[in-house]
């Protein structure tokens, strides 16, 4: 019985998250997942990911990718992706969420085409940045390292001549995405959205799903969970955060949050209260 309880505990995700005082870094997120697989979702920030143990298998823009530990993965904002362990013991990852001040939207197309970068120098610099972010008082070092990382990422991702950056973003789907972005908390009904963009509701859902590989409601819930993460790290209670991010109640938040992050809002908030590793 004791051995069985130990096995059950070992499958629980272990996460640590915090928001450092470094411009451009929205969140630092460290996680060890053994069995958890996160479904298709989006972020409003760039996801800069390194895997320290194991490997992740994920889909981005309907194409399968993997993250052996010698690569750096850069997943662009607003583009759906999922993820699951590619090895029996799961994976341990370190993630930085970066806002548009560090990487612009003009790089999204190139990142979709080639999200996994085999660059030992870049991999080492990202690891050094995580070390600096874990030490309060080293913000200048962290910002300096982040600047060099951004420069190297842009060198990898400069769009090729003639690239059509809007080819995955038809007008109708983009207009619905803009409506969802404007009303993340308040939400919007499908009939109202369809009337605003002059489209049949069914056609609107199909256009959005074709363009982004994710249904409109999944996109909206992803955006709400992203907001909830920020507020939880700022010290908000799950109940207050649920109301502030458009969820019906705390249970509604918990259901979607655990589905996308792997842990409950309460556990996630505690990880933020502990601060950076060693804090």
Image (cartoon, rainbow, N blue to C red):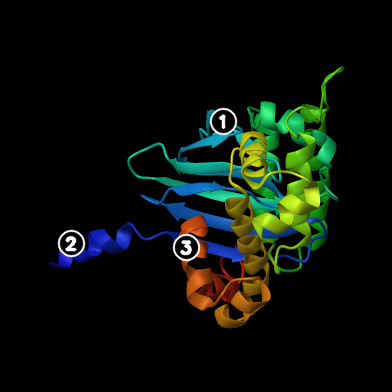
Measured as percent of width and height from the top left, residue 199 is found at: 73, 43
Q: Residues within 10 Å of mark 1 (few under 14, many from 20)?
A: few
Mark 1 to mark 3: distance in Å?
24 Å
Say which residue label 1 marks: 62
Labels in figure, total: 3
Q: Nearer the viewer, residue 266 or 40?
A: 40
**Mark carried by residue 258:** 3
Q: Is residue 223 above or below residue 166?
A: below
Q: Are marks 1 and 2 in contact (CB under 8 Å)?
A: no
Residue 99 shows in this picture:
no
Q: Are marks 2 and 3 in contact (CB under 8 Å)?
A: no
Image quarter of the N terminus = bottom left
Q: Earlier in the sequence, mark 2 or mark 3?
A: 2
Real-space CA distance between mark 1 and mark 2, rounded to the nearest whole angstrom: 38 Å
Q: Residue at x 47, y 58 (%)?
A: 259
Q: Farthest residue in the top direction?
A: 162
Looking at the picture, tell me which residue is in the foreground, 264 or 32: 264
Pointer 1 or 3: first along the chain:
1
Q: Position of residue 60 (x, y in %)?
A: 59, 35
Q: Quadrant of residue 134?
A: bottom right
- SS class of the residue under badge 3? helix
Left/right of residue 206 with respect to residue 78 in the rendered view: left
Residue drawn 76% across the image and 40% down it? 172
Q: Residue at x 83, y 50 (%)?
A: 144
From the viewer's perspective, is residue 57 above or below residue 32? above
Marker disc for residue 4: 2
Q: Nearer the viewer, residue 279 or 190?
A: 190
Report helix, strand or loop for mark 1: loop
Say whether residue 77 is visible.
yes
Query: Where is the C terminus found, in terms of image quarters?
Result: bottom right
In the structure shown, which secondary structural element does the residue marked by tag 2 occupy? helix
């Amino acid at each position: 019985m004791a051995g069985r309880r130990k096995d059950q505990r070992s499958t629980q995700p272990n996460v640590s998250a915090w928001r450092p005082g470094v411009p451009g870094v929205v969140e630092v997120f460290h996680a060890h997942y053994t069995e958890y697989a996160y479904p298709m979702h989006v972020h409003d920030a760039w996801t800069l990911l390194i895997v320290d143990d194991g490997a992740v298998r994920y889909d981005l823009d309907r194409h399968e990718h993997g993250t052996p530990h010698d690569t750096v993965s850069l997943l662009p904002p607003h583009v759906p992706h999922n993820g699951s362990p590619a090895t029996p013991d799961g994976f341990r990852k370190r993630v930085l969420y970066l806002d548009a001040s560090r990487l612009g939207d003009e790089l999204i197309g190139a990142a979709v085409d080639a999200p996994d970068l085999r660059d030992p120098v870049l991999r080492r610099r990202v690891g050094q940045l995580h070390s600096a972010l874990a030490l309060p008082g080293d913000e200048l070092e962290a910002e300096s390292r982040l600047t060099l990382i951004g420069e190297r990422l842009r060198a990898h991702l400069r769009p090729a001549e003639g690239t059509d950056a809007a080819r995955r973003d038809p007008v109708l789907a983009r207009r619905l995405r803009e409506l969802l972005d404007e009303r993340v908390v308040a939400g919007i009904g499908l009939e109202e959205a369809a009337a605003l963009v002059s489209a049949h509701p069914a056609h609107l859902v199909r256009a959005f799903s074709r363009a982004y590989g994710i249904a409109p409601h999944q996109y909206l819930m992803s955006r709400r969970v992203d907001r909830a993460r920020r507020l939880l790290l700022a010290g908000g209670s799950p109940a207050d955060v649920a109301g502030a991010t458009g969820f019906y109640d705390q249970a509604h938040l918990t259901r979607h949050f655990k589905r996308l992050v792997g842990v409950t809002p309460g556990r996630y908030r505690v990880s933020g209260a502990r601060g950076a590793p060693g804090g």
